[in-house]
Amino acid sequence: MNIHEYQAKELLAKYGVPVPAGYPAMSVEEAVEAAKKLPGPLWVVKSQIHAGGRGKGRFKELGPEGKGGVRLARSIDEVREHAQEMLGKTLVTVQTGPAGKKVQRLYITDGVDIEKEFYLALLVDRESGRVAIVASTEGGVEIEKVAHETPEKIATINVDPATRLMPHHGREVAAALGLTGDLAKQAGKVLAKLYETFLGTDASQIEINPLAITGTGELMVLDAKVGFDSNADFRHPDLEQLRDLAEEEPMEIEASKYDLSYIKLDGSIGCMVNGAGLAMATMDIIKLEGGEPANFLDVGGGANKEKVTAAFKIILSDPAVKGILVNIFGGIMRCDIIAEGIVAAAREVDLKVPLVVRLEGTNVQQGKDILASSGLPIIPANDLGDAARKIVAEVKEAVPA
Ligand code: ADP
Ligand code: MG
């Protein structure tokens, strides 16, 4: 789960990380009220979307000449103008994809006098299985570019989970950022607090870009991106309220209600499969046959009629879907029960696209008989290859290349 910048900053502030003061705003009036609570004379109006690159991003409605998604304001009136111009518009950044994201919240924050910008992140390094600290003097700009062009400017330091964070990690980060004296001390403190936040919230990522040295010689977090490990959600019921459903794929939200693992993709063949491994294999073989999967969907072990119906509805709510491939292995769940579920669900949703079903496992013959005698135009398949060839052919016929 990801959260907004303002939520990340509120969380970091609770752990004692230095952040500028600021308030979220859902309307122009709220933005003005927020600005009045801050001292000025410089404010920053920041679009809140779950994507970075906002400063350099552009609003679709304003064109390439328009201003970006992070703007400085030198008066309350200017805050109002920016808020008016940004709210409700679609911001396109390098991280949103061409469709962009609608800005529904703003963050009004203290403008800081910046001397220098750094990059500092904590994440889980899958290779070492440890928390890694990533630090670079090249903050502010896109870190992906730095990693590509001047990788020597990025330092990566692993933390041993047995010792946890030690003072020497702080010194290494300070050295990597070229900091000495009091600023080096501050870097150690900020790092310790970020690490505490990381462990305390079961974060998967805390990315600070930029971490700035201010004109008064203080280290401050000016932008923060925080994501949590969803496997640990149950340990943090308090974090659930930070979820912004407007930022998530609506079909994925619907799927989570039925305990279905669904991820939307860009193709035209909807897939309904039990088991994550089989779902991956099904997607692979669709591609091998020249088709493109429209989604990943694992209905899980207990695929009953309700779940299958919900899965059909979710798959069909994607207008790009031109055909569906059901690939179910009846182990604990018998094929006849699954077949009944498919027939009932196909009737309920009034299926209009071709449906290929491959069943295998316990009571497979009874299952196939139920599908065949249903009167529905279900295309049976004998194995995975056969199923993929059939659905790809059906979809090609429906939408000639
Ligand atoms: P993004 O990374 O999505 O573009 P940032 O929050 O990093 O958004 O903002 C972009 C740039 O705007 C920063 O690199 C920084 O130079 C400037 N900026 C952001 N917040 C402030 C602030 N509170 N005061 C002054 N400048 C800021
Ligand atoms: Mg940033």
Image (cartoon, helix red, strand yellow):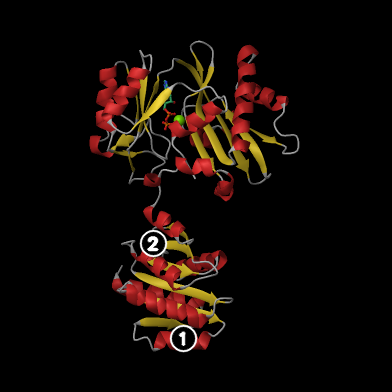
- For numbered disc 2, what is the local secondary structure? loop
Horizontally, residue 316 falls left or right of residue 331, namely left
Q: Residue at x 34, y 72 (%)?
A: 395
The location of residue 58, given as percent across then percent down, is 31, 35
The residue most toward the right is 162
Q: Residue at x 64, y 22 (%)?
A: 188
Identify the amino acid type marked 2.
Gly
Decide: is 52 above or below 283: above
Quadrant that contains the C terminus: bottom left
**Whether residue 113 can be seen here:** yes
Q: Which residue is mark 2?
A: 267
The location of residue 293, given as percent across then percent down, is 42, 64
Q: Which residue is mark 1?
A: 368
The location of residue 123, given as percent across then percent down, is 59, 39
Identify the amino acid type marked 1.
Lys
Horizontally, residue 355 falls left or right of residue 196, namely left
Q: Nearer the viewer, residue 333 or 74?
A: 333
